[in-house]
Amino acid sequence: MMTDRLIGLFEQSDGKFLSGEQLSEELGVSRTAVWKQIERLRQRGYRFEAVSRKGYRLLSKPDRLDISRLQLKLETERFGRFVKYYDQVESTQIVAARCVAEGAEEGTLILTEEQTAGKGRMGRKWHSPVGKGIWMSLILKPVWIPLLFTPQLTLLVAVALCRAIRSAAGVEAGIKWPNDLLVGGKKVAGILLESSAEDERLQHIIAGVGISVNLQSDDFPPELRDTATSLAIEAGRQVDRIEVLSRFLLEWEQLYELYRREGFAPIKLLWEALNVSLHRNIRCRTPQGDFEGFAEGIDEHGALQLRTADGSVKKLYSADISFG
């Protein structure tokens, strides 16, 4: 309640400075309590200017996803038609798992403005600041495909995402096997699929996707600034998150139905046309060890075919790759 009242006071001030004393009197709390509330708002993406003897001035509010606008813009039949939207969660993957347990339908979308412990591959944390990206999970129930073919779905999601980014943001994204999207050699999005199976058949998949949309350089921690980028940085402008998201869901649903009808072959062709990983020397780090070789292609399951120095071909289903 106090936070909402504080935001209201700044919104009514029409960009003027409000002193700590004035805010303290209006809210009936100490000036220290006012300062703590402002710091909490800063963590949520609000920007303030603080000047000695003048007080605080609200510079900008975080951009929020307009779910009603998303629903109006959607052209899908199922994907994203039911949305669970949160200001903050630990991870959309965790929320989605609870939704599955409660009987959520295929196509249910979990969206948040901020993740405090976003999940990346191999236990990594995904950087998910408030109001700057698309942090989401989508529930799929492809019970009609064998468990063996699960890696194909990661490549399908990557194709849908790459096409959506190129269309909605106007930047030349490319797919890095198995689950990253790059622009100018830097990571702009990532994909994480977590599955559940019974009797070698998929029961459900939770597809987590993180897209760095409107982050600026100083929004990334120092250790990521040389390897990560955003759509806004690459496009040179603010990018409409709803436009990216609605386009992505449409591409995804259409490719999913194509995959259901015709199998992996057309998805594989689309992936190969958008990839930046093949026909070059690469280094691969896997739980089974490190490998180097020439990336010849992907097989019918979505595995990477790596020709090593001894001439043999090694199939990799998951790895961290770097380019040599």
Image (tube, rainbow, N blue to C red):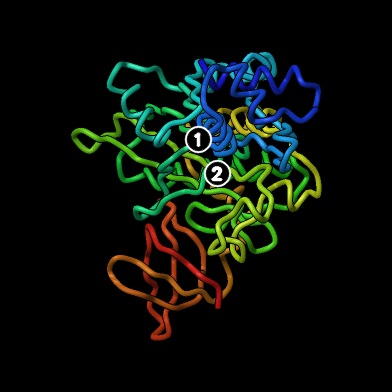
Q: Under tag 2, what secondary structure?
A: helix
Residue 290 image offset from top left, x and y in percent: 36, 75
The amino acid type, in three-letter code, at marker 1 is Tyr
Image point (64%, 27%), residue name: 21
Seen at 50% across and 22% down, the residue is: 85
Q: Nearer the viewer, residue 90 or 273?
A: 90
Q: Is residue 306 above or below residue 80?
A: below
Q: Residue at x 43, y 64 (%)?
A: 320
Q: Amino acid at mark 2?
A: Ile
Label ID, residue 31: none
Q: Are marks 2 and 1 in contact (CB under 8 Å)?
A: yes
Residue, x 69% and y 37% (percent of image)? 48
> How many neighbours does mark 1 have within 10 angstroms: few (below 14), some (14-19), or many (20 or more)?
some
> How many numbered marks have been drawn onto this rendered protein structure?
2
Of 151 and 138, the residue lying toward us: 138
Residue tagged by mark 1? 259
- 44 vs 217, nearest the viewer: 44
Q: Which residue is mark 2?
A: 267
Displayed quadrant of residue 90 = top left
| Front in this rendered view, residue 220 or 266 | 220
Q: Position of residue 41 (x, y in %)?
A: 57, 32
Q: In the rendered structure, which disc, 2 or 1, sits on the residue that comes first in sequence?
A: 1
Q: Quadrant of residue 220?
A: bottom right
Residue 270: x and y in percent read 61, 47
134 relative position to 52: left or right? left
